Image (cartoon, rainbow, N blue to C red):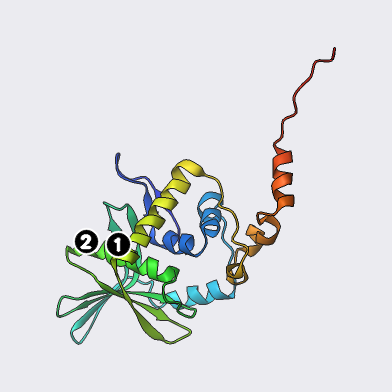
Amino acid sequence: MTVTSSQGREGDPAQVSLSALEHYTYCPRQCGLILLEDSFTDDTATVRGTLLHQRVDTPGNRGRGTVRTLHALPVWHDGHGLTGICDTVELHADGTILPVEHKSGRYHPGGPADVQVAAQAMCLEYMFKQPVITAAIYSGTDRRRHTVTVSEALRTRVLDATSAIRNLLSHNHTLPPPAADSRCRRCSMAADCMPKLLAGTHRYQQALHNLYLIDDIQDDDE
């Protein structure tokens, strides 16, 4: 798991990693913990994902019939400030370019993985100078591929998330509030996040206010 952001040439936007897009779309606070506090905790699901990616994270170029398959392909988009690595990219004889993102868990249509693989498609468009309108997500749980249409709406989600992450890194530097919902049960970073404790309750907000409350200093003569 790699989530990075860096500044490229002068005047270029800060680089946002494709994996950060998935984390931010799933939960902005999770992304903030990783990027701002360099915090990440493995659980069963993340270890499963690491083992699954061992098959595709070794760079390589393989051919099968009319399809050329590239593994662990570095990709980028200078205009959007995106960078990352595609698990698998298939180059078909008819000119079709298909990014395939591998996930260990069950596929959720319209979820964070769709945003990540759409960003891969946008990077491949930039690099190969041709449209990439379809992507795929392989689910280890489902044991099959799921087709993702790289629509204009999905591209907008990519750019919105990119802008939000860049703002978090460049201007805000404040952790987003915890989700404190069903996502937390599936998050390996729940112990770092403490969502139930830090949810926007009145007691927490009052304690936070009191922590930084500066009382007026009165003269001793009063």
Amino acid bearing label 1: Val
Q: CA distance from mark 1 to mark 2?
A: 8 Å
Q: Are marks 1 and 2 in contact (CB under 8 Å)?
A: yes
Q: Position of residue 203 (x, y in %)?
A: 74, 51
Residue 81 can be seen in this image:
yes
> Which disc number belongs to residue 141?
none
Amino acid bearing label 2: Met
Residue at 24% of width from left, 71% of height from top? 133
Q: Position of residue 221 (x, y in %)?
A: 85, 12
> In terms of depth relative to the viewer, which is nearer, 219 or 165?
219
Residue 54 can be seen in this image:
no
Q: Which residue in the protein does label 1 denote?
A: 75
Earlier in the chain: of badge 1 and badge 2, it is: 1
Q: Which residue in the protein does label 2 denote?
A: 127
Number of on-image labels: 2
Q: Secondary structure at mark 1?
A: strand
Up the image or down, 92 lies above or below 37; here it is below
Left or right for 73, reference 164: left
